[in-house]
Image: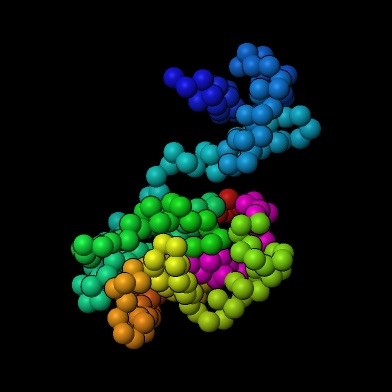
């Protein structure tokens, strides 16, 4: 076993036993010197697994506790989303996804793949992109009430990379407000060679609960640059939102935020 992985596993096992651990007690329990232990704890805090709980005390985060819990959504809901996405995928001959928020991560609830020689791997795409820089992540954040958004930023602070050239968080928030007002998000990534769209999906109270997303390789874009694709996306997101409202689903049937 790689030594540092064993040490991390030992630390997390001790912390997961419950309560908080002072540094001294944790060092004794793991047989690690203070320097090594502090360096590992700093990394674990950065990835969101551990947090400081008072002066010199440490505990696991809710985010870490949720990592092992595979999201359990209503089978009726998932069946409808899967069927609707398949119909969309067949019409536009492209792959599409529906995603939502789980703590500080964009997770895919439903996916429909249309087979091409050149395809966009949505799972890799969403795993690599930040909550704050993917088109669907931005749509999900943009749709949250301001107070809820601030709590999310507090739990998962914006980094310089997340700001994407904006001078501060206020500039980034103005971008999110513009996305919310537009009711859509668009991105062209020349590095990855894709054009991506994302639109909000709403619950019974007209609160955002999910995002409908689609990415197309630039080499496969039609002459209209995807305008007909966008019209199809609007039709589907309205159809799904209406069905969700009729069935009485709320955003909490989709999202799981750290402060709920």
Residue 32 visible somewhere in the drawing? yes
Measured as percent of width and height from the top left, residue 36 is found at 66, 22
For this view, does 214 lie left or right of residue 155? left
For this view, does 203 lie left or right of residue 171? left
Residue 103, above or below 135: above
Q: Which residues are magenta?
A: 135-159
Residue furthest to the right: 55
Q: Nearer the viewer, residue 219 or 133?
A: 219
Measured as percent of width and height from the top left, residue 228 is found at 32, 84
Magenta stretch, main secondary structure, is helix
* Residue at 53% from the left image edge and 66% from the top image edge: 138
Quadrant for the C terminus in the image: bottom right
* Residue at 32% from the left image edge and 77% from the top image edge: 221
Which image quadrant for residue 242? bottom left
Q: Nearer the viewer, residue 215 or 251?
A: 215
Residue 209, above or below 53: below
Quadrant for the N terminus in the image: top left
Residue 204 visible somewhere in the drawing? no
Count of labels in the image: 0
Which image quadrant for residue 4? top right
Q: Is residue 104 magenta?
A: no
* Residue at 53% from the left image edge and 82% from the top image edge: 182
Q: Is residue 148 magenta?
A: yes
Measured as percent of width and height from the top left, residue 32 is found at 64, 16
* Residue at 62% from the left image edge and 35% from the top image edge: 43
Q: Nearer the viewer, residue 87 or 163?
A: 163
Measured as percent of width and height from the top left, residue 44 is found at 60, 35
Colour scheme used in the picture? rainbow
């Amino acid at each position: 076993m790689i030594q540092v992985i064993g040490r991390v596993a030992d630390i997390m096992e001790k912390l997961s036993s419950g309560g908080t651990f002072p540094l001294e007690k944790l060092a004794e329990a793991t047989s690690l010197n203070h320097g090594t232990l502090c360096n590992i704890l700093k990394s674990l805090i950065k990835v969101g697994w551990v947090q400081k709980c008072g002066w010199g005390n440490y505990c696991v985060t809710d985010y870490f506790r949720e990592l092992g819990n595979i999201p359990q959504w209503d089978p009726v809901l998932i069946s409808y989303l899967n069927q609707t996405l398949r119909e969309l995928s067949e019409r536009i001959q492209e792959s599409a996804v529906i995603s939502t928020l789980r703590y500080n991560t964009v997770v895919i609830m439903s996916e429909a793949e249309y087979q091409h020689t050149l395809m966009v791997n949505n799972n890799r795409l969403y795993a690599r992109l930040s909550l704050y820089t993917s088109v669907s992540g931005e749509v999900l954040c943009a749709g949250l009430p301001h107070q809820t958004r601030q709590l999310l930023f507090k739990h998962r602070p914006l980094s310089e990379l997340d700001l994407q050239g904006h001078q501060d968080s206020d500039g980034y928030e103005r971008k999110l407000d513009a996305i919310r007002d537009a009711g859509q998000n668009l991105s062209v990534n020349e590095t990855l060679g894709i054009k991506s769209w994302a639109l909000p999906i709403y619950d019974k109270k007209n609160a955002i609960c999910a995002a409908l997303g689609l990415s197309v390789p630039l080499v496969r874009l039609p002459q209209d640059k995807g305008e007909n694709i966008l019209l199809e996306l609007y039709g589907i997101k309205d159809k799904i939102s209406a069905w969700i409202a009729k069935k009485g689903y709320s955003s909490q049937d989709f999202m799981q935020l750290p402060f709920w």
